[in-house]
């Protein structure tokens, strides 16, 4: 099982941010470890989270606002279940990104019936809308060139893998990829956590979360208006995972 | 251990020329050979009924035409001086129906008797145990029982001396005038006390029919001496059997006292249990069952079996059960509980004590069960559709072997499914190999899922063949109902100053969703106190969880192992108040130390 991360170019100075080099390296190493975690979890993820009613319901609300053939970016698409399948099936042009090779392989193997087959890329969501989309991941259309090209972005339980201070950064980059008035469907776990290692299916994953009122503030500050919000209790089918309060939000790009 | 120690016990001893008028010196070797064989046979069993049966067989017809054994009623505790024998009861008779009068109508003594002693002492006397005979103080019966002098034989109807008159009187006391009238004149009777090590235990009555009918004369001096010797042996053998029964009883009491009387009744699962002691002789098992409530509404289910059958097995069981409880409460994964139990077992005593055990944790919220096995028989999982399967767990090694890894298996346990844990006594009997028993049990439980756990236990016990059972049996049945995710709320909260306030808001929000606004005020107060305490010690995120069942349960967890203790607080003392508030407002509350910290919880009744 390879992650590909090891063979990635690491042009340190190329990062657009203000971080100094060592912070960037540390951040990327952590992301790589997360990807490795998901590589080993693989199909175990689908077993622990079998029913995704809340996510599907949120997808349906999004689809009700989109025209057929609309361009949708699924951030942290994983094995494609259920969102890539749902969106493709509804006739959307779906682009999916994920950092885990194994999860992407599972997604590519799964059938996604629909008029437009999904396009799946391996890349770090942190690099969306930046120069590194081209330089590090060879996906120029998700770099600065892709600004304003998406009608909607979905991100279900992917932003929770970022440290709290990176979440507004990534939200801002997602906003850049959205056209004005574009939609963001977000799935989060309600918690007050900043990148805290928690046991996750036999591994340890660093997880972040907000309580719902904090999350709304973060979204507002990032340039989104929350149009709908739903909390759903969810019990993973695993004794090693506690039940969680899932938050589903439908937001619109302001400005 | 079987009750027959001597394999030759089934054969009656050879007759040493009993029909001679007297025993000339040349018959001494035969007489001694008879005594030797009879003595061994009387002492061959450890069970009361078998001892009496053996005694009867060596005495009749070799020495007498009939024999009746009367024992004190109730059977005495041979460890103590039981005092005057107030009444006697026939425990065995051979070759006569003497003393078996019709029972008075409505007398249920026999059933009670059978229930009490039949199972307790394993006594299955060939005689129909008749009513008890009172022993009159100062009477002939009392005299013979307490007499130290060797008994004199008596020929009924013969011109009697005082001894003969006393024996006639004794027979009248024992069998009544009508019973006595059934004995023809010329009948020879020998009444011998049966003495134990400390006290008289009963009376042996030997009868020879009149010489005209039986063709042999009454008891002579050699016969009397022989009978006295065998009565001594029989008395000691009865004493031994009673001691042995007593020992079994003590061990059994010990065993029972170490099993939980009542299991906890956690939410989301219904439990039932059975314990059946082994029936024969002094077999005490080390079987146990247990259920331990864990945080998060989970419950640990345990069934184990200490190898061997002795007082030690029961004692080791008690220690292992306690260890298992302690380890379970730490909320360790099942394979780690077994690992630590294994380590503990190696420290119990000098000898190696082995035990098999299945340890399962049911999570009603995740609808899963995690199991680990230490050399135990596989449990049966019954699915909601009624299919039953023997769980193919990695068998592992028994507890006490040491240095062996255990592994946990996690399986779906949806609402409507059920799990039966049991010990091998249920499926392995003398007449049935283990694999047959397991398959029989599996088939029996298929379709039995929709019922109560009691019903599962009953169904399981139906596979037992009739007749005696060697091993003891422990059963634990769990019917899984689950707790819907909608009745659960759980959060991770980083420890900060504002965390108690946030926890209050989360709790209030959830209670609103559940329509439990009436509990909001008290819950907010208690949650905020517990979270305040937790935040003070925590270095990692604290957890807050609310579960709605027939109670509202709140748990606050943190990574500090320090258990909170309610303290007396002064008016200036800010700390330590929280728990007093919780203790006052909650219906129940408690704190549990975990492998990774602790959980403090409280429960409130729903309005």
Image (cartoon, coloured by chain):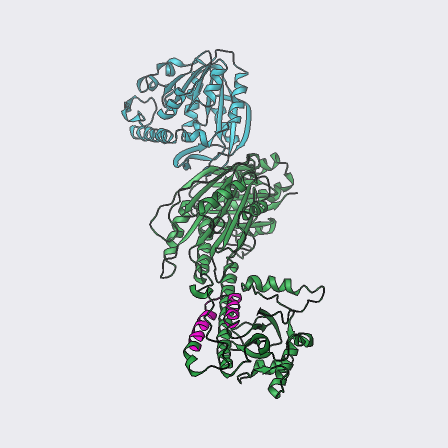
Residues A216 and A38: in front is: A38
Across and down, in percent, residue B436 comes to 47, 44
| Letter of the chain shown green in the rendering | B
| Letter of the chain shown cyan in the rendering | A
Q: Is residue B33 visible?
A: yes
Across and down, in percent, residue B187 comes to 60, 78
Residue at image position (30%, 21%) is A14
Which contiguous range is marked in magenta? B31-60
Residues B458 and B487: in front is: B458
Across and down, in percent, residue B2 comes to 46, 61
- The reply to whether the magenta stretch includes residue B38 is yes
In the image, residue B369 above or below residue A94: below
Across and down, in percent, residue B332 comes to 43, 46
Q: Is residue B531 visible?
A: no
Residue at image position (47%, 60%) is B283
Quarter of the figure with residue B372: top left
Would you say B147 lies left or right of A47 here?
A: right
């Amino acid at each position: 099982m390879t992650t590909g991360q090891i063979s990635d170019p690491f042009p340190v100075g190329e990062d657009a941010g203000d971080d100094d080099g060592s912070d960037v390296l540390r951040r990327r190493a952590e992301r790589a470890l997360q990807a490795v975690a998901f590589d080993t979890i693989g199909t175990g993820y689908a077993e622990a989270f079998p029913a995704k009613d809340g996510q599907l319901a949120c997808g349906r609300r999004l689809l009700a606002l989109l025209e057929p053939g609309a361009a949708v970016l699924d951030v942290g698409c994983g094995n494609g279940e259920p969102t890539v399948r749902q969106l493709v099936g509804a006739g959307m042009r779906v682009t999916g990104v994920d950092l885990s090779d194994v999860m992407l392989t599972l997604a590519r193997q799964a059938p996604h019936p629909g008029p437009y087959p999904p396009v799946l890329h391996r890349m770090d969501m942190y690099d969306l809308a930046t120069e590194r989309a081209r330089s590090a991941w060879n996906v120029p259309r998700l770099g600065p060139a892709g600004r304003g090209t998406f009608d909607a972005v979905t991100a279900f339980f992917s932003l929770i893998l970022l440290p709290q201070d990176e979440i507004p950064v990534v939200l801002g980059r997602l906003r850049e990829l959205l056209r004005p008035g574009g939609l963001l469907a977000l799935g989060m776990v309600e918690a007050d956590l900043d990148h805290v290692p928690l046991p996750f299916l036999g591994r340890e994953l660093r997880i972040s979360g907000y309580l719902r009122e904090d999350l709304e503030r973060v979204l507002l500050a990032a340039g989104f208006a929350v149009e709908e919000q739903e909390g759903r209790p969810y019990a993973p089918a695993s004794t090693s995972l506690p039940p969680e309060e899932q938050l589903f939000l439908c937001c619109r790009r302001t400005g | 251990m079987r009750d027959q120690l001597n394999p030759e016990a089934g054969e009656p001893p050879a007759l040493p020329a009993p029909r001679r008028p007297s025993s000339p010196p040349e018959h001494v070797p035969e007489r001694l050979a008879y005594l030797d064989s009879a003595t061994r046979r009387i002492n061959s069993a450890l069970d009361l009924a078998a001892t009496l049966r053996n005694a009867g067989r060596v005495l009749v017809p070799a020495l007498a035409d009939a024999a009746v054994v009367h024992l004190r009623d109730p059977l005495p505790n041979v460890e103590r001086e039981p005092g005057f024998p107030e009444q006697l009861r026939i425990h065995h008779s051979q070759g006569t129906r003497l003393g078996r009068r019709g029972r008075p109508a409505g007398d249920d003594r026999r059933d009670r008797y059978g229930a009490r002693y039949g199972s307790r002492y394993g006594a299955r006397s060939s005689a129909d145990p008749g009513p008890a005979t009172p022993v009159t103080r100062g009477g002939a019966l009392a005299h013979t029982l307490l007499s130290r002098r060797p008994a004199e034989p008596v020929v009924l109807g013969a011109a009697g001396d005082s001894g003969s008159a006393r024996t006639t009187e004794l027979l009248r006391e024992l069998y009544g005038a009508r019973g006595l009238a059934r004995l023809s004149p010329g009948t020879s009777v020998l009444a011998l006390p049966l003495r134990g090590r400390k006290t008289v235990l009963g009376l042996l009555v030997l009868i020879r029919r009149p010489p005209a009918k039986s063709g042999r004369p009454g008891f002579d001096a050699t016969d009397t001496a022989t009978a006295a010797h065998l009565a001594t042996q029989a008395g000691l053998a009865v004493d031994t059997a009673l001691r042995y029964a007593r020992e079994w009883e003590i061990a059994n009491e010990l065993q029972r006292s170490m099993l939980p009387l009542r299991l906890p009744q956690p939410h989301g699962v219904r439990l039932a249990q059975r314990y059946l002691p082994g029936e024969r002789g002094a077999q005490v098992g080390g079987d146990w069952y247990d259920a331990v409530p864990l945080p998060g509404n989970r419950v640990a289910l345990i069934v184990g079996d200490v190898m061997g059958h002795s007082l030690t097995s029961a004692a080791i069981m008690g220690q292992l059960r306690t260890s298992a409880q302690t380890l379970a409460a730490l909320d360790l994964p099942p394979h780690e509980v077994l690992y630590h139990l294994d380590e503990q077992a190696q420290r119990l005593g000098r000898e190696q004590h082995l035990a098999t055990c299945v340890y399962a944790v049911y999570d009603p919220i995740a609808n899963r069960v995690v199991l680990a096995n230490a050399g135990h028989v596989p449990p049966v999982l019954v699915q909601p559709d009624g299919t039953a399967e023997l769980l193919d767990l990695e068998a592992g090694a028994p507890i006490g072997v040491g240095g062996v890894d255990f592994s946990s298996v996690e399986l779906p346990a949806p609402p409507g499914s059920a799990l039966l844990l049991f010990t091998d006594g249920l499926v392995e009997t003398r007449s049935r190999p283990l694999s047959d028993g397991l398959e029989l049990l599996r088939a029996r439980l298929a379709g039995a899922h929709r019922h109560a756990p009691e019903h599962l236990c009953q169904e399981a016990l139906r596979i037992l063949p009739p007749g005696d059972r060697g091993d003891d049996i422990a059963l634990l049945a769990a019917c899984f109902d689950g707790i819907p995710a909608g009745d659960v709320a759980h959060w991770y909260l980083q420890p900060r100053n504002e965390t108690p306030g946030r926890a209050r808001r989360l709790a209030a929000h959830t209670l609103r969703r559940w329509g439990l606004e009436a509990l909001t005020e008290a819950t907010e107060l208690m949650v905020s106190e517990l979270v305040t305490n937790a935040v003070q010690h925590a270095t990692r995120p604290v957890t807050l969880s609310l579960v709605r069942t027939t109670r509202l349960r709140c748990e606050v967890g943190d990574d500090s192992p320090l258990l909170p203790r309610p303290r007396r607080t002064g008016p200036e003392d800010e700390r330590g108040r929280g728990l007093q508030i919780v203790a006052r407002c909650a219906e129940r509350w408690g704190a549990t130390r975990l492998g990774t910290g602790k959980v403090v919880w409280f429960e409130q009744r729903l309005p």
